[in-house]
Image: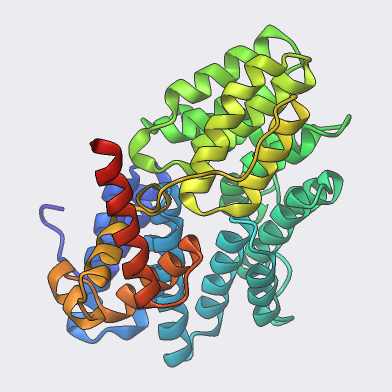
Amino acid sequence: MTGWALTPTTLTCAAAAGLLVAVDGAAHRLAERAVGLARERGELSMLPRALELRAIAEYWLGRHEAAAETSRDGLRVARATGQVNCANVHLGMLAVLAAIRADRDTSLRRVREIGESPTPGSRPHALAGWALAVLDLVDGRPAEAADRLASLARLGTGRGQVLVQVMATPYLVEAAAHLAHRPAATAALAVFDRWASSTASPLRRALSARCHALLAPRGGADAERAFQAALRLHPTEAGMFERARTELLFGQELRRSRRPRDARTHLHQAREMFSLLGVERWAEQATTELRAAGESIGPPDLPAARLLTGQQLRIAELVAEGATNREIAARMFLSTRTVDHHLRNVFHRLGIRSRTELARAFTAERHVGLASDR
């Protein structure tokens, strides 16, 4: 950034460039600085765009909950400053993030909030289409999902939202894998491949490999090699969700190729990761696949510590020790709103309703751990 005036505008442009070349961590840091500087200078009109870029970086980094929180913040600021289109973009991101977690009610509510105002071909319209396509895929309607995703852009003409379609390409390919006719998915994957191969991003390359596995002939060596390559490429620092999806899809491929024993290894991995992430619908799908692969299986039996992210676990421990949300925010350098948000997720994941129940759960778990150590 030598020679550049550090302004919210220049930082936002740099963050956008970082996302285009898939340096997600750097893009996130630049967007974060743009957000901080815009707040510090009172340039609120710049905040929604900077927050949008931060949310996209968090999406690619696998931090879906953080991305949703960022988009909610962007939505509030956009509405407060009268930026209707920016507000709709954040609503679209929230719809996509909810759909990816198979949270149908939240996703559809966000799509309805966008309403009829965005013109066809606009970014909010494309994001809403992506969200609805993911829900179609979750509900077993691959043809409808593929049609929605193929319509986001017309490759070769520059029309439509090409960048949104590139982000959504793994879902387009997954939907098209169930269909006999796949020209739109093949064309979109060619664009995604060019992008992935031009970057140093292991995640983009992992997703590219997974897409090729899905389009390879079923039961063949090409599909297995591509799935194995995807699993080798998935970065551990970018979160578990995409790796879990690859494990699930690989397990499905092996089971349908009449290799149930091999399938079970990957399906167990997927089920455990989805359970750790609190993504119940995907964990249920992995469980269904395990049963179809011949395994009798009950609900996952995971301790509280393994059901929570690191930050959620620390917040839960402080609550169990009697700290207030304000005290936790001060100790962890977070806003009280962020602590509130994480605590709601903790309650949901652990199936409890109060701070007292949380304290009891952690006390009981400590006693079990001490007993097992004797």
Where is residue 345 drawn, in percent x and y? 44, 67
Can residue 161 be seen here? The reply is: no
Q: Closest to the observer: 258 or 105?
A: 258
Can residue 30 be seen here? The reply is: yes
Give residue 172's quadrant in the image.
Answer: top right
Left or right: 328 as drawn, with respect to 356:
left
Residue that protrudes farthest toward the left in the picture = 2
Vertical placement of residue 207 versus 165, above or below: above
Q: Closest to the observer: 207 or 157?
A: 207
Q: Quadrant of the C terminus?
A: top left
Vertical placement of residue 233 versus 157, above or below: above
Q: Closest to the observer: 336 or 133?
A: 336
What residue sits 67% from the left and 60% below the top? 131
Q: How is the image coloured?
A: rainbow
Give residue 198's quadrant in the image.
Answer: top left
Residue that protrudes farthest toward the right in the picture = 180
Vertical placement of residue 244 versus 42, above or below: above
Vertical placement of residue 8 versus 132, above or below: below
What residue sits 78% from the left and 15% below the top? 258
Q: Closest to the observer: 260 or 110?
A: 260
Where is residue 351 drawn, in percent x and y? 51, 65
Number of numbered discs visible in the structure rendering: 0
Give residue 50's quadrant in the image.
Answer: bottom left
What residue sits 64% from the left and 41% below the top? 298
Where is residue 168 drawn, in percent x and y? 62, 48
Where is residue 187 drawn, in percent x and y? 71, 34
